[in-house]
Amino acid sequence: MNMIKKIFFGSLISFTFTIIFIVIFSALMVKTNISEQYIDIIVCIISGICILIGATITSRSQRKFGMYTGLLLAIFYVVFLYIFSSVAIKSFSVGTGAVYMIISSVTFGIIGGIIGNNIKK
């Protein structure tokens, strides 16, 4: 049960950073002439970095099972994100972009878990 709480807390950290970075990116899009064709790629990168941060923090506090912790955090993050998206957007569908998002999220989660496990306190 303790691991589930830490994964939930790590997911909250990841979502908090995601919101902050998305707001910054949105402001940059308004102020500059960044093409809209890059939105999906940048959102995928932002999500990956935020999952990496959350997985690192979570597995650092746990000190074991880093890959497993990062993987579970990434899966929880992606599942929650897609449930929220399907509720918020009526024409929501899962395509190749979603597959890339899942693969990158899981990869960043595992890497974050490994990093967090190997950081010395």
Image (tube, rainbow, N blue to C red):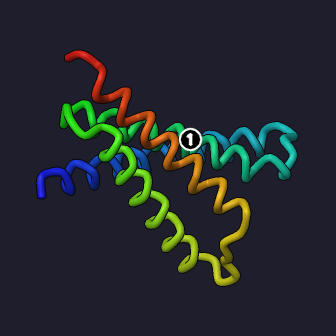
Q: Which residue is mark 1?
A: 21
Residue 118, quarter of the rendered image:
top left
Confirm whether residue 102 shows in the render. yes
Height in image: 94 above or below 11?
below
Residue most toward the left?
Answer: 1
Height in image: 71 above or below 97?
above
Q: Residue at x 18, y 37 (%)?
A: 62
Confirm whether residue 19 shows in the render. no
Residue 92, quarter of the rendered image:
bottom right
Where is residue 66 shown, x and y percent of the image? 30, 37
Q: Residues within 10 Å of mark 1 (few under 14, many from 20)?
A: some
Height in image: 18 above or below 94?
above
Where is residue 73 shown, x and y percent of the image? 36, 51
**Quadrant where the image shows the N terminus:** bottom left
Residue 88 as seen in the image, left or right of residue 50: right
Element under label 1?
A: helix
Height in image: 28 above or below 16?
above
Residue 86, quarter of the rendered image:
bottom right
Asked whether 105 or 44 is in front, the reply is: 105
Q: Residue at x 53, y 49 (%)?
A: 105
Residue 97 as seen in the image, left or right of residue 78: right
Q: Residue at x 45, y 34 (%)?
A: 111
Where is residue 65 shown, x and y percent of the image? 25, 40
Residue most toward the bottom?
Answer: 90
**Quadrant where the image shows the C terminus:** top left
Q: Residue at x 83, y 51 (%)?
A: 36
Asked whether 38 or 66 is in front, the reply is: 66
Q: Give the residue type at disc 1.
A: Phe
